[in-house]
Amino acid sequence: MKKFLTSLLVVSIIIGSIGIYNNRIQVSAKSVEDEVINFTVNSTTIKKQDVHTTHEATYKSSYFAGNSTLYNNDLAILSTQMSLAASSTATTFHRYGEALKLAYVSNKKIDFNETRNGYLAKAYKDLGFANDVYYKYDKSLNDTSDTVAHGIASKKIIVEGNEYTLVNVTVRGSAYGGEWASNYKITNENGVAGAYDAGREVFKHICEYVEKYKLGKNTKFWICGLSRGASAANTAASFVDRMCRDKKFKFTTDNVYVYGIATPNYANESYEEDVKFNDPLYDNIYSIVYENDISAMTAPQKWGNGRYGQVVTLPTIYISGKNIDKIEKGKKISEKEVSKKQLELAIKISKEYNEILYRLYPEKYEEMKDKIFRGFAVNKDFSKVLDSGFRILGESNAEYKELWQGIATDIIPFCISRAKKYDTDTNAWVKYNSFKEYLVDKYGEDILNKAIIEGVYSQDEETKNKTKVNNLYNKGVIKEENRDRLLQLVDLYYGVRIAMVNYNMDGDFIKLVTKRVFSELWELIKYSYPIGDATDCTRTHDGEFYLAYLRNFDLMVGDNY
């Protein structure tokens, strides 16, 4: 680890010495004590990434007073909003394969149509930040490398009578395209998770920024990110803390404020020498995680994965789909199922969530404003299904890498969006009909022929299994949502077999492994999927949901649950 830190510092010094800019923080306005800025955050919605939305935000310089190890819910809210602003702009999202120019605070007008980082640049401009630099936003969204887009900017602030340079680092965690593939590299060629390597790159850029602007002891760092971006921010911040401990940075961890929203477990204590996630050194690093956010549970903790620092857990609120329907119809439900406080909080969060998503779309807002957030229909017991799924995939990072990692990088992009191409006539994405179609389009017809020759794929067998699923539904054995998921499972089953052939695995081995996985998942989905209307499980990872939750719930303030 020391060699890694030292080499980065040397690189930073070299880059700083050849910088063509004046190495002084540019101040856009006179610093003031207790500065308050109300501004509008622009972002791309998590669920529909070509839809633009806005939400009101408040910045206060007083958020950066006191020790960074003390949780600040207001700063958590603002960090969530900045993280949402780090998304690719909605108007550029369909321009997947294009390299685009960047927006900067110095631009007279920031164009959301032409720049992917426009939302973040505008947020920096509204907050009075300058010296902004951006990484990877100009790249095609087809890029699947173990990197992550992020911005760094700075401003002068006065806190408790002292002037500081406040540096913000915000990491993109939504509308980021091909970076999805890196999320499922639990172990890459460098022996770490792809998102962890992305965090190390963010840290490298922080080192360059510190050296370029000669940042000393009167420096405060504010690092934030959402989802994958939160994981990268978590990793980068851990290296910053170690640099502070080793006095390679002149500022201290007391002045490093870190908030990750919906942070997955992409770090591992085995990656660095003498590193423990719960070391008090990292107490300034917060991960805010909804208790039933399935996506934030990856990679599995039982494989030694985790997060640096402290975790703030937002408690699960469970309201069955049936009860949600009753509430929306004005009917009462039993307090035994949902307490009065939980229901009141759920309604507040839902109203806030709907306003965030639909405030720019009046007709849609009128339709949705009184709807209950469907993510509340997911029972936290659904995590047992997830645990079973990981058990099937292996018992360690190494086993997962050997068998499934390459295939996962094919499966996940397909499962997330099924996006084939963007139709400019209809302004909509054309979807693949099946995983098999996706693989054939990606690798060519030969991959299907090879699978047939190896005896791992048969069209007749696939049709037979799909008929079996439909018969179970027609006989009333399974519900409609279970039928749909089982049909998807059949599709994935044969697609995975084809993909495994592409990775040159033996035909008999493919049949043995996939039959075991298929049979176990079949039973899980057939009988367990109704637990908590689990088809809505991905909703609880929405950044907008976290924002709505934090705005209405602060763990540090009494009994508000």
Image (cartoon, rainbow, N blue to C red):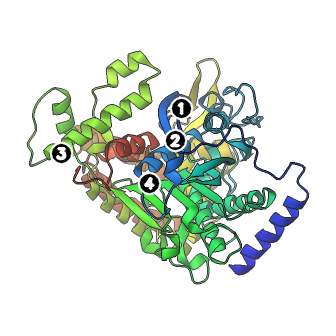
According to the picture, the residue beneath numbered tag 1 turns out to be 39
Q: Residue at x 31, y 57 (%)?
A: 524
Question: Which of the marked residues, 1 or 2, is nearer the chain's N terminus?
Answer: 1
536 to the left or right of 403: left
Do we see residue 130 in this rendering?
Answer: yes
Q: Dot 4: few (<14), some (14–19), or many (≥20) neighbours within 10 Å?
A: many
The label nearer to you, 2 versus 3, is 2
Q: Secondary structure at mark 2?
A: strand
Instruction: Give the alpha-carbon distance from disc 4 to disc 1, as whole Å.
Output: 30 Å
Labelled disc at residue 59: 2
Which quadrant would residue 189 be assigned to in this image?
Answer: bottom right
Instruction: Give the alpha-carbon distance from disc 4 to disc 3, as whole Å.
Output: 26 Å
According to the picture, the residue beneath numbered tag 3 turns out to be 341
Question: Which of the marked residues, 4 or 2, is nearer the chain's N terminus?
Answer: 2
Between residue 501 and residue 38, name the one nearer to us: 38
Q: Amino acid at mark 2?
A: Tyr
